[in-house]
Amino acid sequence: SYDTCDAAQNINDARDYLSELVTLTDVQVVNRYLTVPTTGFSVAGDGPSFPDSMFVENQNNVLGTFATNNPNYPAFGTLCNITGVVHYTTNTSSPSYRVCPRTAADIQILGPAGVTPSTLKLSFSVFPSPARSVNVAFTLPHAGDVRLGVFDLFGRRITTLAQGQMAAGAYSKAWAGVDDAGRHVKPGMYFYRLDVGGKVLTTRSLLLN
C-alpha cells in the first residue's frame, strides 16, 4: 500500500508531510490569468525551451496581503529567483503544482520590469497550453524592430500581435483565439513567430474550443 498512489488519502503517515525545496532561477513574473490572482503570482522561464509557467503561492500568508505596493508581489516582467516548497493543491477548479516560499526572503529580485538591456536575454514563450486563450511573453535585450504573429498549420498568418519599433524590456501579449477580423478561429495547433531584427524564434501551442 505504500508503493501505490494514495489518491483517496486513506493512508496518513510521515510521507504525507515530506516536502521538496526547489529554486526557480532567472524566471520572469508573467500575467497568466485574465483576472490577476491575489493569492500569489506566476513566473515562467526565460527561453523557448521553458514554455510553461509555475504559480508562486502565498501559503500561510508569508507574503502578506496582496497590494500593488507590496514588494512581495513583483510587477509583471520582473526578473527574480524563487525558492520554495513544491506543493500540489486540489482546492481549485484546476488542480496544479505550485511553489510556496517559506518567507518573503525566498523571493530574490534580480531586476525590475524594464531592467537595463545588459541584463536581458532574447526570450519567447507561450503559455498555458492547451488552453482557450494564451499569453505570449517575450523579452528584448535591445531595442529593435519587432513583428509577432500567429500562424496556422499551413503557414497562413492568423493575426499580428505586435509590430514596430519596441524598447528593450519584457512584454506580454494576450491572444484569445481570434483573427485580424475578430473572428474566432478553430481549435487546434497554432504557431507563433517572433522576428526581432532578423532573429527569429518560434514556438507553438494547442488552442482548445
Image (tube, rainbow, N blue to C red):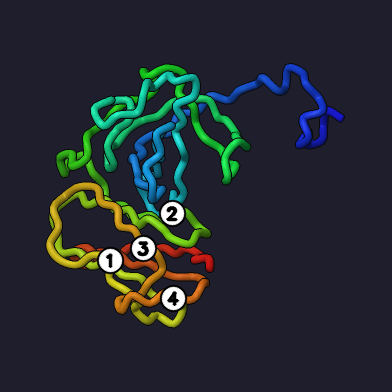
**Which of the two discs, 4 and 3, labels the residue nearer the N terminus?**
3
x, y (%) of residue 3?
Answer: 82, 32
The answer for how far apart the CA atoms under marks 3 and 2 are is 10 Å
Instruction: Tell me the residue at 28%/28% (across/down).
Output: 109
Residue tagged 1: 161
Instruction: Out of 161 and 35, give the one closest to the viewer.
Output: 35
Residue tagged 2: 127
The answer for how far apart the CA atoms under marks 1 and 4 are is 15 Å
* Mark in the foreground, 3 or 2: 3
Bin the neighbour count of mark 4 within 10 Å (Cα to Cα): few under 14, some 14-19, many 20 and up: some
**Which of the two discs, 2 and 1, labels the residue nearer the N terminus?**
2
Residue tagged 3: 175
The answer for how far apart the CA atoms under marks 3 and 1 are is 8 Å
User: The residue under label 3 is which amino acid type?
Assistant: Trp
Residue tagged 4: 185
**How many marks can you see?**
4
* Mark in the foreground, 1 or 4: 4
The answer for how far apart the CA atoms under marks 2 and 1 are is 15 Å
User: The residue under label 2 is which amino acid type?
Assistant: Phe
Q: Secondary structure at mark 2?
A: strand
Instruction: Tell me the residue at 34%/40% (across/down).
Output: 29
**Which of the two discs, 3 and 2, labels the residue nearer the N terminus?**
2
Contact? badges 3 and 1 (CB < 8 Å): yes
The answer for how far apart the CA atoms under marks 4 and 3 are is 11 Å
